[in-house]
Image: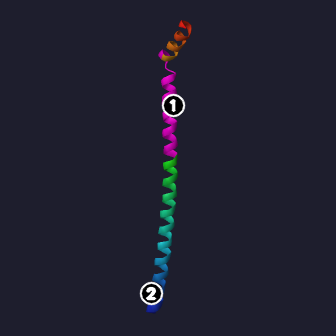
Amino acid sequence: MDTQTTITLLTISVLLLSTVVVVILGIVIVILLKVRKITANFDVIMQNLNQASEWLTPAKVLGQIANLFRK
């Protein structure tokens, strides 16, 4: 093979690999951003669930019912 042909093929290979690496990094960043958004939504859901479970404890519900009859 000619040296010029070898250099040209290596240059093309490097450019293709660089493009693939940039695309893969972009995909990874997009996936990480989506996972971050999902975890933020999950945190909000868990906080709401925690507040709801606190409000629905039997002692609290019975206490509120007792307060209604006392008034």
Image location (x, y in percent) of residue 67: 52, 11
Placement of the C terminus among the 4 image quadrants: top right
In depth, the one of 4 and 56 nearer the eye is: 56
Which stretch is magenta? 38-59
Is residue 1 at all visible to an observer of this figure? no
Question: Is residue 40 highlighted in magenta?
Answer: yes
Image location (x, y in percent) of residue 33: 50, 53
The residue shown at (52%, 36%) is: 45
Asked if 64 appears above or below 33 in the picture, the reply is above
Asked if 19 appears above or below 44 in the picture, the reply is below
- Dot 1: element: helix
Kind of residue at badge 1: Leu
Image location (x, y in percent) of residue 21: 47, 68
Mark nearer the N terminus (1 vs 2): 2
Q: Say which residue label 1 marks.
A: 49
Image location (x, y in percent) of residue 10: 45, 82
Q: Residue furthest front?
A: 71
In depth, the one of 16 and 64 nearer the eye is: 64
The residue shown at (51%, 66%) is: 23
In depth, the one of 31 and 1 nearer the eye is: 31
As drawn, the label of residue 7 is 2
